[in-house]
Amino acid sequence: MVNRSVNNTAPRLIDDLNALHARYVAAINAAVATGDQDLVDELAFGYDTEATWMVAEREGKTHLLPLKRRAA
């Protein structure tokens, strides 16, 4: 018989990413409301970096970081 019990004590990656996204959306919206474009840009970059690290840590792929960005 297969044990199909689920460990509900560990947060799922998607739940943590959703929470991270919600925090950044609120912060970016506040920065937009004050007209602080530099902060908006900083927060957008911060979200991308933090989310990428979160996924890499959970997937055991931190050795692939930092990611190399292609020139636009």
Image: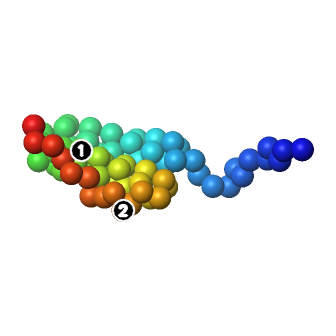
Q: Residue at left 41%, top 47%? A: 20
Q: What residue do we see at 49% from left, 55% from top?
A: 58
Tag 2: residue type?
A: His
Can you name the residue that lies furthest to the right here?
1
Q: Is residue 46 left or right of residue 19?
A: left
Q: Which residue is mark 1?
A: 44
Q: Which marked residue is nearer to the observer: mark 1 or mark 2? A: 2
Task: Pick whichever of labels 1 and 2 is earlier in the sequence.
Answer: 1
Distance (Cα) linking label 1 and label 2: 23 Å
Q: Position of residue 54 (x, y in %)?
A: 42, 54
Q: Position of residue 36 (x, y in %)?
A: 13, 44
- Residue visible at 70% across and 50% down in the picture: 8
Q: Is residue 58 visible?
A: yes
Report the side of 24 relative to 11 (left or right): left
63, above or below 15, in the image = below
Q: Is residue 59 left or right of residue 29?
A: right
Task: Tell me residue 17's x, y (percent).
Answer: 45, 45
Q: Say which residue appears at 35% left-offset and 50% top-offset.
A: 52
Q: Which residue is mark 2?
A: 63
Is the C terminus in the top left, top right, bottom left or bottom right quadrant? top left
Mark 2: give few (<14), some (14-19) or many (20+) Cα within 10 Å.
few
